[in-house]
Every structure is written in C-alpha cells, then in structure tokens.
Amino acid sequence: MTSPVITCLNDWLQTRLSDEHRQWLDDQLNKILAANSDRALHITLGLIPRKFGRADLNLTTAELNQAASARANWAPTHWTVDTAARIYILSHLAARDSAKFGDTITDLCRNADLAEAIALYSGLALYPQTDTIDKQIGEGLRTNMRAVFEAIAHHNPYPAEHFDENRWNHMVLKALFIDSTLAPIQGLDDRANAELATILCDYAHERWAAGRVVTPELWRCVGPFATGAMLDDLQRVSESEVPQEKHAALLALSTCPEPRAADILNKHPEIKSAIADGRITWNALD
C-alpha cells in the first residue's frame, strides 16, 4: 500500500515533470529497488538536479493541505522540484526497508554536496525514526553551513517533536550564532522554556558587551519566563529608538505573567493596542 507521503510527492511531480522526465524517474526508481548496491541510488540522486533543474516547487494551497493531511505539520513550503524528486526516491527505499534506511542516509550525507545535503535533511520528518538517523541529525546541526542547519531547523517538524530540552535550546542558540532566523522554527513558542530564556538573556548581554546588535526576535523566547533581571532587559529594549527592537520587547512583555511586565507595557498604549489587535506580531515586525 502506497503511503500518503509518497502519494503526495507522486502527485506533485506528475504535474511538474514532462512525460520524458517522469518516465526517467520511474525507470531509475525501479533500478534502485532492484539493485544489490547503492551505486544506482547515488547516481540517480546526483543526476536529478541536472535532469529536472532546481526550480521552486511552489505548492498550491490545496497541495499544502494535502501535505498536512499526509503527515502532521509537514510544510514543504520552501522545497524545490529536485528536493521533492530526491525525497520521492528515498521514501520508497524507507518503505521497503526501514531498518537499513538509517545507514543509507548516513552514507548519502557523508558524500553529499550542499544541495543534496539540504534535500536529505529536509525530508527528516518523513523518514523512519532510528538512532542512526538521529545521530546523523546531530552531525547536521554541528555544521557551519547555514543552509544545511536550516534544512533541519526551519519548516521541519522533527526538532519540535523529537529533541529533548537541552538539544532544542542549543539549536535555537546556534540559529542566533550563525545569523539564522527563529520564526521559521516550528514549535518555537510551544517549546520555549525557562532555561532557554536564561541562555538567551546571557547571550544578549554578551552581544551588548561587545557592542553588537541583538536580533529582536530573541525576546520571543524570553517573554513568558521573564522575571527580575530579564524584565530589566526587556524594559531596556522597550525604550529603544529602533521600532523593531521596541516592538519585540513589548510583544515579549505581552506574554509575561509578571505584574511589572504589564506596567512596562502600559507605558506604550498605542503599541499595546496594536499588539492586542494583531497589527504587530512576531511574523510582521516593522
């Protein structure tokens, strides 16, 4: 029985590939499934972008709904055609032999170029969950290549669903270290925690001491747990002349249960009203 994920990928590729390219992909898949080695797999994954190009997949609203129905929180909004084709091949392999699949992914990541690594990690939430794959995810998070890190951290339900608190916190902090953004991280608000808030405030103080800018969205993970010195930090940022910084601090304070947070917020009635009305949000800081 074909999995809902494979059905999605098949449907999307059917409408985006020519008949010739679609036949080539099916022929290659049959070769891979019949082979006793991974040579055909490596060759096919390498040829896919040359055959199909790297155009954006540009999924429709209906197709994104199809994805969400096939796999909860699956949001391939930034996938390309070659990524979808590669994951289509890999999904068939995972369905055939989930026990071996972790070793296959590890081998592919070891030899992947940048674009292929992005594709491999983008499919994490669709793979069978094994210790081998989890270990490979750790390798991906340690990389200095931001695009590979973001393939794991952004628009991907795997971290929110599987990372423990320590691993989650380190991922969020690393996103800031490499100048990545936090908003595309799924579960960012749900997985916020007091330890992370402390870590991020310490990071902000290090940046300030070095005369460096602190990204406004850092405060998103601080607000619900702010107390004491953290509220001092948020009050400081709320007085910034930079609108994005001011708005971020006040957004954070709007989620804080401490009475002092409400007192600070009340000093900015126009912004408080805009936050309440949804005119100022984390996804639209201006």
Image (spheres, rainbow, N blue to C red):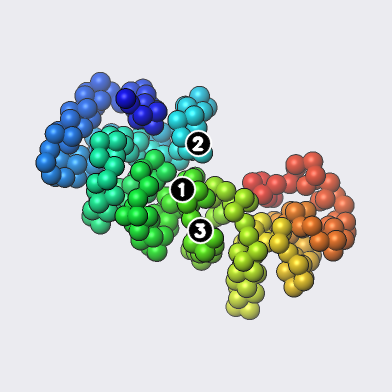
Q: Which mark is residue 158?
A: 1
In the picture shown, does residue 1 fall above or below 206?
Answer: above
Report helix, strand or loop for mark 3.
loop
- Which residue sits furthest left? 36
Q: Amino acid at mark 1?
A: Tyr
* C-alpha distance separating marks 2 and 1: 11 Å
Q: In which image quadrant can residue 195 be found? A: bottom right
In the picture shown, does residue 107 fall above or below 31?
Answer: below
Give the residue drawn at x 71%, y 58%. Answer: 224
Q: Which mark is residue 164?
A: 3
- Which residue sits furthest bottom? 209
- Considering only order in the chain, which callout, 1 or 2, is on the residue closer to the N terminus? 2
What percent of the width, then of the height, locates residue 262?
Answer: 85, 58
- Considering only order in the chain, which callout, 3 or 1, is on the residue closer to the N terminus? 1
What percent of the width, then of the height, locates residue 179?
Answer: 51, 61
What percent of the width, then of the height, locates residue 175?
Answer: 51, 60
* C-alpha distance separating marks 1 and 3: 11 Å
Give the residue drawn at x 35%, y 36%. Answer: 84
Contact, mark 1 vs mark 3 (Cβ under 8 Å): no
Q: In which image quadrant can residue 141 be found? A: bottom left
Q: Residues within 10 Å of mark 1 (few under 14, many from 20)?
A: many
Q: Amino acid at mark 2?
A: Ala
Q: Which mark is residue 273?
A: none
> Is 132 on the left or on the right of 275, as rendered?
left
> Is 265 on the left or on the right of 141, as rendered?
right
Number of numbered tags placed on the structure image: 3
* C-alpha distance separating marks 2 and 3: 20 Å
Q: Amino acid at mark 3?
A: Asp
**Residue on which disc 2 sits:** 72
In the picture shown, does residue 60 fall above or below 55?
Answer: above
> Is 79 on the left or on the right of 250, as rendered?
left
